[in-house]
Image (tube, rainbow, N blue to C red):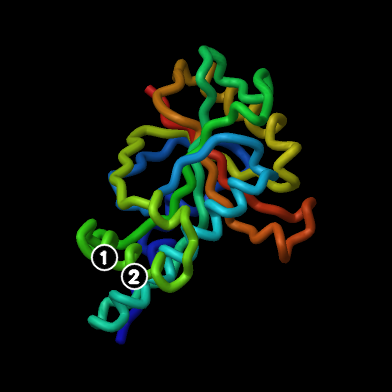
Amino acid sequence: MSKTDLISLHKALYTAQAQPAIIFVPAGHYIAINGQGDPNGPLFAASTQALYTAAYSIKNIYKQSGQDFTVSKLEGTWWVNTNTHNPLAVPREEWQWQLLIRMPDYVVSAVVQQTLKAAFVKKQLPLLQQVSLIALAEGKSVQILHTGPYSEEPATLKVMEDFMKKEGLTWNGRHHEIYLSDPRKTAPERMRTILRQPVK
């Protein structure tokens, strides 16, 4: 039985260089969960656990019907409820986020809802009830690879912002991050994160 690998299928979306580049991001399906607060806080950790539990539960259901797939990387969109594009200008407790894991296009909402109900009964994770299947279409975007700890992202974001100014581009959506490295297994200086910004 073949296994769908979305990272390989959409290679341009999951690879980036140390210099910014313009890409086009077509619509895709994701399971998602929303939250607010410090990414080092308990809600973020619990939301991540719920999302991965959902992803592997959905994978197992589809595998039984001959449509197996590899669970993709954790992603997240970030924003603040102010006019600033700089989240560092507000307390971390006010950061808004939506955690995402991409799903194959054949994954449908009805199956996801049934699977999540069964997973909740089995795992008793309350946040499973907040996971949903969504469509996300970002279109024209600027993408760059950040290497190093999350705390050093502002320097990479500055490179992206300078590139956008040079190209005459403006923000057109939420800041998007794709976590290529597992922080539990990777030294901070070797962490790799794709930073993406939809533009117009």
Tell me the residue at 38%/63% (across/down). Answer: 6
Mark 2 packing: few (<14 Cα in 10 Å), some, or many (20+)? Answer: few
Nearer-the-camera pick, 77 or 10: 77
Q: CA distance from mark 2 to mark 1?
A: 6 Å
Percent from the top left, x then y, of residue 72? Answer: 46, 62
Q: Amino acid at mark 1?
A: Gln
- For the N terminus, give its image quadrant: bottom left
Q: Quadrant of the C terminus?
A: top left
Residue furthest top as drawn: 83
Q: Are marks 2 and 1 in contact (CB under 8 Å)?
A: yes
Q: Which mark is drawn over residue 118?
A: 2
Say which residue label 1 marks.
Answer: 114
Question: How many discs appear?
Answer: 2
Q: Give 116 or 142, whichever is nearer the viewer.
A: 116
Q: Quadrant of residue 180?
A: bottom right
Residue at image coords 48%, 47%: 99
In the shown orientation, is residue 102 left or right of residue 21? left
Q: Quadrant of residue 114?
A: bottom left
Name the mark on residue 188: none
Q: Amino acid at mark 2?
A: Ala
Q: Which residue is nearer to you in this view: 167 or 9?
A: 9
- Secondary structure beneath dot 1 equals helix
